[in-house]
Image (cartoon, rainbow, N blue to C red):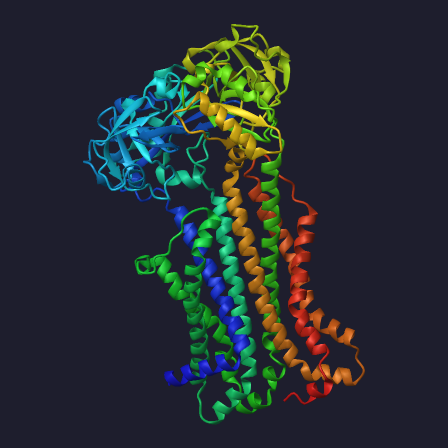
Amino acid sequence: MFKNYLKITFRNIVKHKGYSLINIVGLALGIASCILILLYVRQELSYDTFHRESERIYRIEVENTRPEGKEIYAPTPSPYAPALKKDYPEIERITRVYFMNRKLVAYEDKTFYEERFIFADPDFFEMFTFPVVKGSQPGLLSNPNSLVLTTSTAKKYFGDEDPVGKIIRLDNKYDFKVTGVVEDVPINSHFHFDFAASFPGLNDDIVGIQLDQWGAYLVYTYALFPSNFDAKFFEGKAKPFIEAHVGKESGTSRRILLQPLSRIHLHSHSDNEIEPGNTVSNLLIVSTIGLFILMIACINFVNLSTTQSYQRSREVGVRKVTGATRFQLAAQFLGESLIFAFIALALSFILVELFLPSFSSLVNKEIKLNLINLKNDVVFFGFLMIFPILVGIVSGAYPALVLSRHKPVCALKQTGDIGEKGRGTGFLRKVLVTSQFTISISLIIGTFIVKDQLHFLTNSDLGFKKEYTLVIPIQDDSIKSRLETVKHELGRNPNVKSVTACYGTPVGNSLYSNVYPNGKDGPGIFGSVFKFIDLDYIKHFGLDIIAGRGYSKKFTSDQLNSFIVNEEMVKKLGYSAPHDAVGRKLPISLNNIEGTIIGVVKNFHTNSLHEPMDPLVLIYWPRLFSEVVVTIHPGDTAGTISSIGKTWSKFSPGYPFQYTFLNEDINRAYHQEQHTLNIIRTFSFLAIFIACLGLYGLSAFTAEQRTREIGIRKVLGSTIPGIIRLLLSESTKWVLMANLLAWPIAYVVMNKWLQGFAYRTDIGLWHFLLSGGIAFFIALGTISFLTLRTAFANPIEALRYE
């Protein structure tokens, strides 16, 4: 019997090639899209879970609460780690991690700038699970000059040579001995490194400022706690920790927070995160898109399956006359639907393997599907097996349960429900088509709003000049002693507009430290952003001095002893006007400096537009400068950069010339939004395509069913425009109805998403009108070909089409 059913199924596939192709391809595309998105979501949810003790590892954070609000800092001052370990013996292990900026690394004749160089305490490799390839654990970082490499980095510098025991030089000044090699850091880690040096080997000269300060947030601290540990209880217990070591601060409450390691990527958005994380809302949007596409594909499959079943009503009648039971007929139709569904599932795996590299590029993360190990993932494997069964049962339910119950005479004559041309399921099909386009229109609206928000983020006025600006890292310390000469030589280039130096472009590097508005022991202490700037920094970036003055060579006391602050700082200090703050003393925790405010600049953004404006202190301190910033005239950009590189190399011959564009640095803050936009845009198009496949199939069925009717209408005098209007009106009115349903849904969802930004675009009526219009005309174009062909057909052929 099963063999017979299988033969009939494949005969029907061959007989109705068009319907079968649309049915299988549409469902396969839906399943493949869902698998791709499921792989992405699963990877995002798996961050940091590869560590053996991930459930016991927490990152130490600091929460500052003031009357004006609350701040949470991801980094901590360096002294916190040893003090916490001493005060709270339940901490089994603790480690600090300091992330270096771009540094020059050399081994013999191989020299590269490296971005991922960290310093960590000896407990680092005992706490985190980075499998050791070479070297002995524990003790990889026990010596102050120890250095551990990842496998790819070891290959890069040493090839097949054993790197253990070799010496690597940092910035042409500091030597580190390779003590081990570990596997590359997995993609699903909230931080990455290529080099890990021993924290005891980190000195103030490498950092640039005094490292061992209680008020400078420079390192990231991780602690390993016992099993069945109560984080909330510990936070309460450790509440007096900061006060005990730093002192009581009236008006400000500071306490230790514990952030679970596995929650950092999705749930922690504290100040100064190591790497950009994702958000639960973005993940929900992507997951919903995957679910929507699957729903659209399933609706297509059910619609076309039930539509095709109507055409087989005579077959049902013949089978019942020849003795087929209702159970046999039901089993046949359910079996056919299941076979279709499993063919689509097999095709979807081929599509996933085909498009996986493109999808990885789309989300900017390597996504893998291991079919061999798939059976070990119970949830994923179960979904893939159960899903086609459910789809097959749902789509086969109508022919199995409805057609099989009709009397043979009704089935042969197509009377009753059958004779009504499937009107029993006609309304259901219209509802399902409307649902498809409701989902598709919602996705299009979401695409436009995300695109506009991204455009708003990357093109908003940030309060400073950012166009045609190169940021050149200072790797050679001798540059600092000859800085004025270097700037002068770079400025002689006719294509160079201006040159300055700093530690931190407006949205670049920053230090976070405390400000004591009423003295170190007084009330109102709060955190601030600190940047270290050259005398011409303010003019270079077009910042506006709205009170006081800027830095000047005329005032030798400006270096380190004078501060320029922004409007937000003035507000935090409690002044109603900027000029009221000029002249006041302002103690800060950074190196215990007390400076005088000499000027106030208009607010400009130091963070991405995800975050509100921060209080800011600008300090003239050349010792900390880490980059030279060059703004060039538009035109021969490549030639100008080449000329700048030659000039730079004269002053720093031992260091390769490198640069970035400031605009690129700014746009990196919005990579997650760019990836979200790419996903929504790609899968919105796919959703529309799948929906149109189904609409095309249903339109073809409708046109076929109404062939005789159209022939009679033409014989009785109906015009071709009238027939076209008749055929189009039935389909297009449901698309219009879908607009009315999609608009409020899309508005609520996207408005919620936009609330995650401190600065956001507006949702306009045009988003809805344009999206609805696009969907309408796509649907119109899909069914127009069939409509025109039917309308222009010869009525004689129509009347004798059987």
Vertical side of 583 occupied by 77: above or below? below
Q: Quadrant of residue 105?
A: top left
Position of 416 with respect to 225 (left or right) is right
Determine the residue located farthest toward the bottom in the rendered image: 322
Position of 28 with respect to 190 (left or right) is right
| Residue drawn at 62 percent across, 15 percent down | 578
Residue 282 or residue 778, whichever sits in front: 778
The image quadrant where one finds the N terminus is bottom left
Residue 69 visible here: yes
Residue 47 or residue 798, whichever sits in front: 798
Vertical side of 230 occupied by 674: above or below? below
Vertical side of 678 occupied by 493: above or below? above
Residue 508 visible here: no
The percent position of residue 383, horizontal first and vertical second, equals: 39, 61
The image quadrant where one finds the C terminus is bottom right
The percent position of residue 58, horizontal first and vertical second, equals: 33, 34
Q: Quadrant of residue 576?
A: top right
Position of 116 with respect to 527 (left or right) is left
Residue 478 or residue 384, whichever sits in front: 478
The percent position of residue 246, horizontal first and vertical second, equals: 37, 16
